Amino acid sequence: MDICGLIATRKDSKRVKNKATRKFGSSNLSIIKINQALKIKKFKNIYFSSDIPELNRYALKKGLILIQRPKKYLGKCTISDLAPYLVKQIKESHICYLMNTSPLLELKTLQKAVNIYEKLNFSRYDGLNTFEIVKDFLWGKNEPINYKLNKQPMSQNLGGVYKHIPAVSIMSKKKIIKFRNVLGKKPYKIFLKQPESFDIDTIYDFKISELYYKKRKNK
């Protein structure tokens, strides 16, 4: 199976300024993710796309293939716009999309995901994605989503609701283009637990994740 890695980032970040290059531990989120991807020997190639010259230079130095993208695929562009464009520039048929906002993803989890995907029953699953089981009391507009009001369980027994964690997404190029996303309707779910499931979206997420990252590095 020809499978590649893909990492995409951008300069603009509204909630965490310079998130892609901001100092994180002794490095930054993008370099951490590039170096993790390089440890997966089953990747035929690793592609990188950004509008940040210093990251592009680093990626080239490490042997990654750069994908340039027009301004309309930067800024407020969503994954539904970006993913189809990026994968059309890639020659491999299967793509592992990695988010640099998941610095606590363990290498063994990524390796496990690739190994599982290679043996996946594609008549049953669209691809493979990382999730987290939600253990919170969730409500829609008028009623609970994951429990009955008159039979409220203990929080640890809540289930049935999953949060998509975009740390790892593996799908075929054809299905990414079809769904305009790196997540299909029938994903094989790999469940992450905190802190591995942390996805950096705010400065609070950034600081908490960095504390865990430093603690892990010092072990």
Image (cartoon, rainbow, N blue to C red):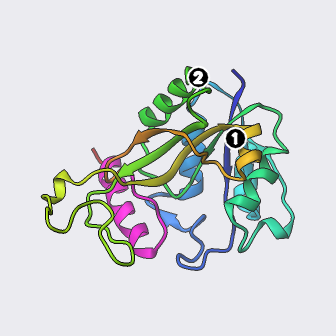
Q: Which residue is mark 2?
A: 118
Mark 2 or mark 1: name the one nearer the start of the chain. 1
Callout 1 crowding tier (Cα within 10 Å): few <14, some 14–19, many ≥20: few
202 inside magenta stretch: yes
Majority secondary structure in the magenta region? helix
Q: Compared to 121, does 168 lie above or below?
A: below
Q: Amino acid at mark 1?
A: Lys
Label tally: 2
- Image coordinates of residue 7 in percent, x first then y, are 66, 49
Looking at the rendered image, the quarter that the N terminus falls into is top right
Residue drawn at x 29%, y 68% is 144
Residue 62, label in figure: 1
Q: Nearer the viewer, residue 89 or 137?
A: 137
**Hey, which residue is sitting farthest front in the picture?**
150
Residue drawn at x 33%, y 64% is 145
- Image coordinates of residue 140 in percent, x first then y, are 38, 72
